[in-house]
Amino acid sequence: MVGTGLDFDAVLELCADTERRIVLAVLADERRPLTLDDLTKTVVKHTHDTPLADVSGEAVTDVKIRLHHAHVPRLEAAGLVEYDPERGLVEPTAAFDRIEPHLSAILDADPVLAGAIAL
């Protein structure tokens, strides 16, 4: 993965967490900036076996906190996204585009992500 600054092990490490894989998958599918709220709803929808409306507000808040304080900053530190916490906007970078083929192979192997990840 020449030119990304990330080696394969680093990409695997970033994909080690289910919530982070969901964020990466939806960013790869959408290929545009997304709000932290959209990412939160997507993670909740794909990690709970109930409709989003039936998930407790506390569970949704917990996911949003993990995304804001852990997952998105980790992706930003790796250079894969730019995060504007003031606007709550997460935008894939050119480095994200460069690793996307490798990322797709990893995400395609995940049974949790079987089928499309939709907002």
Image (spheres, rainbow, N blue to C red):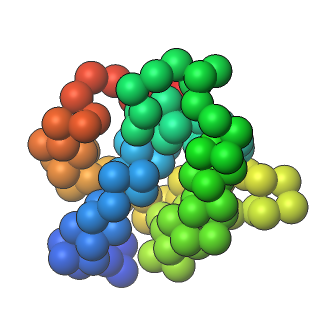
Toward the left, the furthest residue is 109
Residue at x-position 34% and y-position 24%: 116
Image position of 57 (left or right of 95): right
Quadrant holding the N terminus: bottom left
Q: Give the residue furthest to the right.
A: 86
8, 119: nearer the viewer: 119
Q: Relative to residue 60, is residue 88 depicted above or below?
A: below
Answer left or right for 8 relative to 56: left
Position of residue 57 measured from the top left corner of the image (x, y, whole percent): 70, 39
Query: To which quarter of the image does residue 53 belong?
Result: top right
- Quadrant for the C terminus in the image: top right
Residue 88, percent from left and from top: 77, 53
Q: Position of residue 36 (x, y in %)?
A: 68, 48
Q: Is residue 68 above or below residue 29?
A: below
Query: Toward the viewer: 12 or 62?
Result: 62
Total tally of numbered discs in the picture: 0
Q: Is residue 30 visible?
A: no
The residue lying at 17 percent from left, 36 percent from top is 111
Name above or below for residue 83 compared with residue 110: below
Vertical arrangement, residue 85 with respect to residue 109, above or below: below
| Residue drawn 46% across the image and 76% down it | 78
Is residue 57 in view from this perspective? Answer: yes
